[in-house]
Image (tube, grey):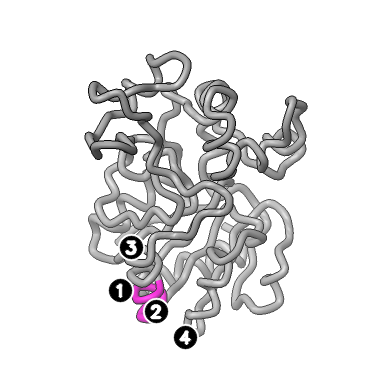
Amino acid sequence: MNKSLSTLQTWVHESENIVFFGGAGVSTESGIPDFRSVDGLYNQKYAYPPEVILSHSFFVQNPGEFYRFYRDKILYPNAKPNAAHLKLAELEQAGKLKAVVTQNIDNLHQMAGSQNVLELHGSVYRNYCLQCGKKYEFQFMLESTGVPRCTCGGIVRPDVVLYEEGLDTDVLNRSIGYITQADLLMVGGTSLAVYPAAGLINYYRGKRLVLINKSSTSFDSQADLVIHDSIGKVLGQLTIE
């Protein structure tokens, strides 16, 4: 075990109020591409850039094109939790981890067994009718064609935060509350380039800020420990006493 991992192991052992804040990199090891890597969605070619297709205005104006892209590139029914998801669930069950704050919408933390997951950008596993509010599950959206319709005739949309839309205030405030109280904040699998989510780190008041990411981030200089490696590899090596 190298020095950085040994330090993280010691901090995890000594901490009782851990919060994990994660991004797309947590799920790439489960086969879900992120948005900004070389192989990510932003570097693939479509009629429109992904950030345009995944915007509120595009959804309203071109729902058919939105849903074609959404089913093809956002839904991953065969994705399974990886070592990072599983270790975080284990830390929660041990009473050490108090919350997972995630930018991901794939439900993998819950599949791994995590109970207190704060989804900043919503979830593809929740869908609702814009007209009557009826709820629909993941499978409905996956098996639908064209613009998905409710039994009442309304459009069914995913409960995810699109570009041009604000974050859920309750989820944001709860996330801030957990981060403010944490004695160890682990941040992993995120470039910390998307705001307002990235700004949540600024609410941490402790002295054990850990950044785990394959590439450097603009917050590296502020961290107490930086590990440039796979989040699954790093967390997977931790032991819980």
Q: Nearer the viewer, residue 142 or 90?
A: 142
Task: Using a 10 Å C-alpha cutoff, classify the residue at mark 2 as few (fewer than 14 neighbours), some (14 to 19) or many (20 or more).
Answer: many
**In this picture, residue 132 sits left or right of residue 70:** left
Q: Report the Cα–Cα distance between label 4 and label 2.
A: 8 Å
Task: Using a 10 Å C-alpha cutoff, classify the residue at mark 3 as few (fewer than 14 neighbours), some (14 to 19) or many (20 or more).
Answer: many
Report the magenta residues as a range.
176-182
Picture layout, residue 15 above or below residue 86:
below
- Verify whether residue 148 appears in magenta: no
Amino acid bearing label 4? Arg
| Horizontal and vertical percent position of residue 190 | 60, 55
Please give the label number shown on residue 16: 1
Q: Which residue is mark 2?
A: 183
Quarter of the figure with residue 31: top right
- Verify whether residue 179 appears in magenta: yes
Q: Are marks 4 and 2 in contact (CB under 8 Å)?
A: no
Q: Which residue is mark 4?
A: 205
Mark 3 and mark 1 lie on one chain; the one further toward the N terminus is 1
**In this picture, residue 179 sits left or right of residue 44:** left
